[in-house]
Amino acid sequence: MLRRSNALRVLVGAATTLLRYADPDPPSASASKRLKDTVEESLEKEGKALGRVACYPHRCLTRPVLPVSEAAVRSPLFMSRLMDMSQLATNLHCISFSAPKAHWDAAVILIKNNPYERDFEVWVNPSVPGYDDRDAVAPMYGMWENCISCGSTTAWVVRPQRITCRGLDQHGNEKIEVLDGMRARCLMHEMDHLMGKTIFHQTMGPEFVVSTVAMGQRNLWPANFPSAEAYVTLSQQFFDYVTNTTIIPPGMEWWYAQNMAQEFHSERLGS
Ligand SMILES: [Zn+2]
């Protein structure tokens, strides 16, 4: 989930930084050509990668996957598929990914804390105790989530702020960790895919699903649509149900400063 919405802008920004440090002279014609080639190459890679992604309601995304045996995790075939999936997620600029999206029937998840991290964190057979207990009293965040497998849609999803996850790493070693911020959000989003669920299942109702275009046209939304908290929460923000305020997701501060500064407004529900 959480693809960068404007790969071109990010790429241009990255290349500009690179040019600034590598070459103090004004950008030359050859530098512009290099930048153009880099952007075109990335877009071509992304286009090809998109063709390999399963889209809801493909059967890969509507049924639970198989757990991976410990012997399988240590096999060369598993490592090869894992590397392939990691490359696919990288080419798509995703900060999290799960095997069903790559047509792989396996309980495997990749997550990053933020888009600047180079490598993905791997979870095999992840489980979160009490995850399905929807009546649990736990601090929650709301967020407009998108998904590479769910087309141009964005859905309001409320999830626990912090979870404890148990599973295996890419070498088959057991691990238990407490996750919060974007890591927790991404892990839960991808865990849903392992269970054959998507943001459409986890959202609160049909009116909480909007197009990505509509997310950029909030000035046209009726006040407090589809709910007061969803209305005040921008893309890439959390709504904290404990403090009743919007916040930058922990782990995303630096990314936010680079990409969303102009769109960020700290908003608070009516006092
Ligand atoms: Zn997804």
Image: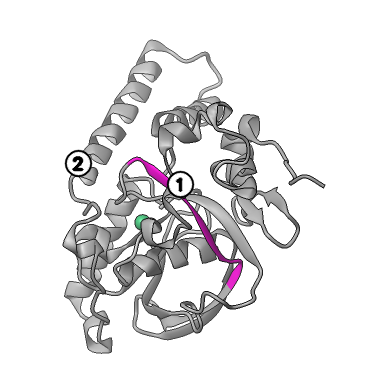
Tell me the kind of residue under disc 2.
Lys
Of residues 202 and 147, which is closer to you in this image?
A: 202
- Which corner quadrant of the image does residue 191 belong to? bottom left
Q: Residue 8 location in percent, x, y? A: 40, 29
Label 1 beta carbon less than 8 Å to ligand 1 = no
Q: Residue at point 76% right, 58% down?
A: 243
Residue 18 visible at all = yes
Q: Could you say which disc has been placed on residue 207 in the image?
A: 1
Q: Residue 26 location in percent, x, y? A: 52, 13
Q: Residue at point 34% right, 83% down?
A: 172
Label 2's element?
Answer: helix
Magenta extent: 152-162
Q: Could you say which disc has been placed on residue 184 in the image?
A: none
Tell me the kind of residue under disc 1.
Glu
Of residues 58 and 203, which is closer to you in this image?
A: 203
Way the structure is coloured = one colour
Location of residue 229 with respect to 77 vertically, above or below: above
Disc 2: which residue: 48
Residue furthest to the right in view is 271
